[in-house]
Image (cartoon, grey):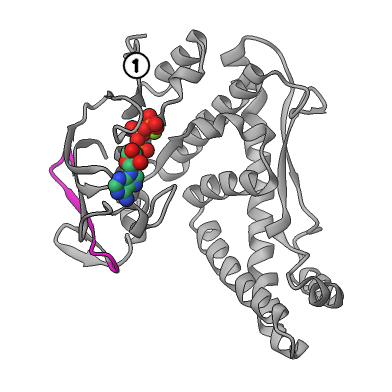
Amino acid sequence: MIISKISLTNFRNQSSYELDCKKDTTLILGPNGYGKTSVLEAIYILTRGKSFRASDPDIKNRTSEFYRIELTTDSGEKRIATFDGSTKTFIISDKKSRRLPKAEKYPVILFLPSDLNLIGGSPSRHRDYFDRFFSQISEEYNTSLSKYEKALKQRNEILKNENLSPASLFSWNILLAKYGTIIHRIREELVNRINQELSDVYYSIADKKDDILLSYKSDVKNNSENQYLNTLEVNLNKDIILGHTSFGVHRDDFDFIFNDKIADGSASRGEGRTVILALKFIEANMITNLLNEKPIILLDDVFSELDETRRRFLVKNFKDNQIILTSVENIKLDY
Ligand SMILES: Nc1ncnc2c1ncn2[C@@H]1O[C@H](COP(=O)(O)OP(=O)(O)OP(=O)(O)O)[C@@H](O)[C@H]1O
Ligand SMILES: [Mg+2]
């Protein structure tokens, strides 16, 4: 899919906005608060189904009754999303639905300035990042994660209840063990796959030989559903005292290892950024190979954070993808 046009109505600060997109690189230029990230947000909603930063009531212009966003592709396909204050509707090829249908999701590589600080981030930021990444690559991961999160929420609600009967937790334990095991297995597989390429891609950007490893940390041992279930049951009394579920993949973390040391604190800021760039590139490669579709690259204000070599790498390596990027100042793109 190549986006040829995007239109926003009452979306954030934009009452009416249109952007024609080029096949290769489109620059959205504007001062702080202009609405640049909002344009990427609209594209993200129309390709992935929901925003990367907020929910619809926050996105709809505060003084308007509704928002409407529309995307046209170079083959003439139109996709529309509307939100009337309570209900969101997608319209694709005249078919209406409340959610973006799976078959209509289109891969996107989103690059936010905050991603560049991922190495030093918290476990929950690391999980969010890799969850988004892995959900695009594996539908099994995507559905298991949402089922796991629902079950976890329910179990935690029950744990907070004063008159709790342990039997009422059993059905949720079963679901957590089932989906937790799947999530754990796919995280292991994809981290291994990333590691096969990470040092090499890093080298191609930095021109410096460093050993980079993504390490997956989990209390879940081996991929056995029974063992997972068992551990949930062993931890039951502790969970009742804590009022939440203390064991499971929702506690996992991902660490970057830089020349055998934890990268946070040992790699320089620039080296850290290069690792993230390498990761984005691997992500795009995996999507292209596995889904046989070229992801759209959305770069939100990241150029200002990168040096000339890394800017060039970004533009050159994504030369076969459509890139839409934002910036507060004009930037050179003809590498
Ligand atoms: N629901 C809303 N209704 C009206 N205005 C909003 C709403 N939500 C956000 N805004 C405003 O919309 C503007 C655009 O936000 P956006 O994040 O897209 O700007 P930006 O151009 O990316 O800015 P920056 O360069 O600072 O990143 C901001 O001024 C923001 O305060
Ligand atoms: Mg912005």
> In which quadrant of the rendered view does residue 304 lie?
top left
Q: Quadrant of the C terminus?
A: top left
Q: Quadrant of ligand 1?
A: top left
- Asked whether the viewer can see residue 37, the reply is no
Residue nearest the viewer, comparing 113 with 205 = 113
Magenta span covers which residues?
71-87
Residue type for callout 1:
Glu
In this rendering, would 262 be left or right of 250? right
Which residue appears farthest toward the front when viewing the image?
Answer: 63
In this rendering, would 96 be left or right of 157? left
- Asked whether the viewer can see residue 211, the reply is yes
Seen in the picture, residue 44 relative to 142 is either above or below; the reply is: above
Crowdedness of circle 1 by 10 Å Cα count: few (<14), some, many (20+)? few
> In which quadrant of the rendered view does residue 250 lie?
bottom right
Residue indicated by mark 1: 329
Q: Which residue is found at the position 82% from the left and 26% from the top?
A: 260
Residue 233 at x, y percent in the picture = 82, 77
At mark 1, the secondary structure is loop
In this rendering, would 244 be left or right of 290? right
- Residue 75 among magenta residues: yes
Residue 1 at x, y percent in the picture = 27, 40
**Mark 1 Cβ and ligand 1 under 8 Å apart:** no
Q: Which residue is found at the position 18% from the left and 33% from the top?
A: 19
Q: Which residue is found at the position 85% from the left and 72% from the top?
A: 238
